[in-house]
Amino acid sequence: MGAAPPLKRLWILLDAIKIAHSVFALPFALVAMLVAAGGWPDAKTFGLILVCMVAARSAAMAFNRLADRRFDAANPRTASRPTVSGPVGPGFLAGFVAASVGIFWAATWFLNAVCFALALPVLAILLGYSYAKRFTSLCHFWLGFSLGLAPLGAHLAVRGDLLPLAGLGVRWGLPFEAFPLLLGAAVLCWVSGFDLIYACQDVEVDRADARLHSMPKRLGVAGALKLSSWLHVLAAALLLGVGYYASMGAWYYGAWAVTAALLVYEHWIVRPDDLSRVNVAFFTLNGIVGLVLFAAVLVERAL
């Protein structure tokens, strides 16, 4: 297949890396932003946080497609991706990764010195995830940790430090601000849990290749789904703790109830003997979770 024009390849790549699914981590970053700023921050800070989040995720997803091209080609579920045999070749992928990394790094420079100093370590974690499955079945937790950094990054973008905030860390007598850490821990458990569900689709491919590791391969599909359910119970408990710690109101707890219900429904529609609705659970339901919580915090903290 001949190479498509650059703009068309870019559009195809953005679709292939699911740019719209930035909604997974972005709402939680914005929640941390609102709390750190005590409301909506200035336009520059908000814009740079948005640029950092989209650029970092784009770099990580495109690098994953580049690093996994051979594995994707051997997997019936992913063999038809345009990054495997279609118009988006490795050179274009590498260029896109480099551009996304550059945009992210430049945006952190305009935020503050702390964000700029942490940019490279954060990128190492995000890009390193693409190789985690080669050596550990805990790769799902690596992904969870990667997205769990979003609230901490947004907090540092606004404040430039982790000093306790009035009404939060100060009220609890802490020497540091725990809000982005608690929220990040909730995101870690939530993302690790839904990635376990998604990974169940590839359990047979993983079993057939000694180079690949995953929890479904190690525990079986039933075991992986059980672990996922416990992670989501922990995520819900942490989100409840986040609300209590930050003295959230009725809007937040209403959103929490919706989130808990969505997580329960997610585990009800995905079963060891029926993985046909994994995409509904992974993309649709989890996309709603962050948006619901962000909307509630926006009402309480900014409106």
Image (cartoon, grey):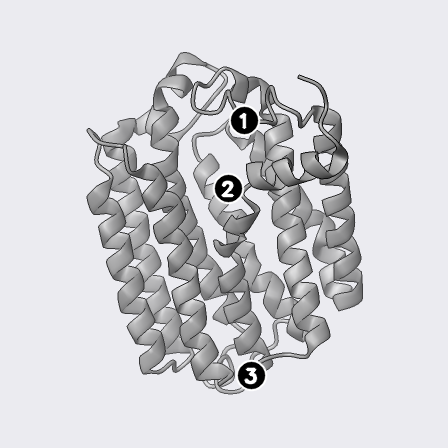
**Is residue 165 found left or right of 93 in the rendered image?**
left
> Does residue 175 appear anywhere in the picture?
no
Which mark sits nearer the N-terminus, 3 or 2?
Answer: 3
Please tell me how crowded label 2 is: few (under 14), some (14-19), or many (20+) other residues with Cα within 10 Å.
Answer: many
Mark 3 or 2, which is nearer the eye? 3
Mark 1: secondary structure: loop
The residue beneath circle 3 is 38
Q: Which quarter of the figure is the N terminus placed in?
A: top right
The residue beneath circle 2 is 142
Q: Distance from label 3 to label 2 (Cα)?
A: 31 Å
Mark 1 or 2, which is nearer the eye? 1
Q: Quadrant of residue 199?
A: top left
* Amino acid type indicated by mark 1: Arg
Which mark sits nearer the N-terminus, 1 or 2?
Answer: 1
* Amino acid type indicated by mark 2: Trp
Mark 3: secondary structure: loop
Q: Quadrant of residue 85?
A: top right
Q: Nearer the viewer, residue 274 or 236?
A: 274
Mark 2: secondary structure: helix
Please report the residue visible at 40 percent of the width from the left and 75 percent of the height from the top: 296
Relative to 295, residue 137 above or below: above
Q: Residue 81: give its label.
A: 1
Q: Give percent across and percent down for residue 89.
A: 69, 24
* Amino acid type indicated by mark 3: Gly
> Does residue 168 appear anywhere in the picture?
yes
